[in-house]
Amino acid sequence: MDFVLQDRLKELLHDPTVAKLAVLIVGIVAILAFARFLRNLAQRKIADDANRYRASKLVNVVSFGLVVLVVALVFSSRLGGLATAFGLAGAGLAFALQEVITSVAGWIAISAGGFFKVGDRVQLGGIKGDVIDIAVLRTTVMELGVWVDGDLYNGRIVKVANSYVFKQPVVNYSQDFPFLWDEIVIPIRYGSDLAQADRILKDVADEIVGDYGRNAASAWRHVAHKYLVESADTTPMVTMSANDNWCAFTLRYTVDYRKRRATRDQLFRRIVEGIAATGGSVRLASATSEIVGVPRLEVQVDRSQP
C-alpha cells in the first residue's frame, strides 16, 4: 500500500497540471500578501484620508490585474482550447448576469467618464449623499436628509448599483461648480422703513456670503468655458414683493454646497439682530388677524322665568 501511495504521489508531482496549479497558488498568495503589506504601509505612512483611500484602491486594482496575468501565463497553453467553452458559457452568463455586467460597465463609465469621484456630493437613484467608495459593482454613499432637516448625515450608508448611471440622471452637487444658489425670505410689516430693511439685508449678505459670491464668480467662469451656458450673477441679490399680509424681501446668494444649512442659520440670526437694533422702525411680520369692529348686540332678559 505504501508503495502505491508513493507511486501515486510521484505521478502527481510530475503531472504538469498539478505543477501549474502549485505555481498558480503560490503566485496568488504572494501577490495577495504583498498587496496587504502595501495597504498596511499606506495606512501608516499616508496621513491624508483621500490620498490613503486612492492608494488602497490602486493597490487593489494592480493586485487584481497581476492575479489575472499570472493565471493567463500559467495556463497560456490551454487558453485556446478553453476559448470555445468560455464562449458558450459566456452567452448564458451574459443573459443571467446582465445586471452585474451593466454595473461593471457603469463602474468603467464612472471611472473613465468622470460622472463623480469619491468625496463628491451626488444624488443617485433617489439617494442623496456623499460618495465614500466606488467599487466594481456598487457605489457607497453616506446618506443625507430623509428624516433629518437640511444637508446633514442621517447615519445610513447606502450601496447603489453602478448600473444607475445608465438608467437615471446623476446629480452632482460639487463637480466643476462647488456652489449652490439658495434663498431666504424675510417678511416685513407694512409701515416699516423698507429702505432700511433693504440695507440691513444687503449688509448682512455682504458680510456673511460676500466671499462665496466672489469665489463662485471665478468658478462659474470655468463652467462657462467648459459648457455652453449663459453668464450668471453670483453676488448676493435682494428683491421685494408685496402681498396682502406683508412685504416679502428675498435674499438670493451663492454658498458652498457643504455649508448651506450653517450659512442660513448665520444669515437669519444676523438679520434678526439687525432688525431688532432699529428700535421698531423695521418690524418683522407674522400672520395675525385684526378685529376692526364688533356689531352692537341687544339682549332681552325674561325675568318671569325662574
Image: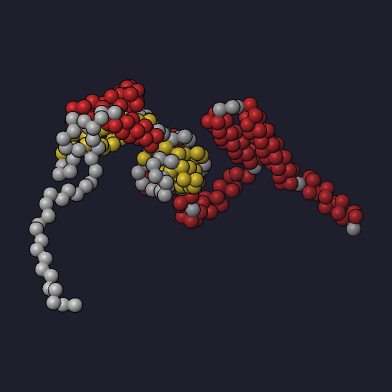
Residue under the image location 53 percent in, 54 percent down: 89
Quadrant position of residue 236:
top left
Tell me the quadrant of the picture where the C terminus can be found: bottom left
Find residue 103 and report its horizontal and vertical position in percent.
46, 46
Q: Quadrant of the N terminus?
A: bottom right
Q: Residue at x 19, y 49 (%)?
A: 289
Q: Is residue 154 visible?
A: yes
Percent x, y for residue 26? 72, 40
Frontmost residue, 50 versus 242: 242
Q: Nearer the viewer, residue 255 or 230?
A: 255
Q: In the visual, does 245 lie left or right of 150?
A: left
Q: Quadrant of residue 181?
A: top left
Q: Quadrant of residue 279?
A: top left
Does any portion of residue 222 appear in the rendered image? no
Percent across and percent down for residue 141 are: 47, 43
- In percent of the image, x 29 and y 32: which residue is there? 276
Whether 279 is drawn above or below 68: the answer is: above
Task: In this rendered view, identify the residue nearer to me: 65 or 133.
Answer: 133
Residue 173 lies, in percent from the top left, at 37, 36
Q: How many marks?
A: 0
Say which residue appears at 17% left-offset and 48% top-offset.
290
Relative placement, left or right, of 199 versus 15 is: left
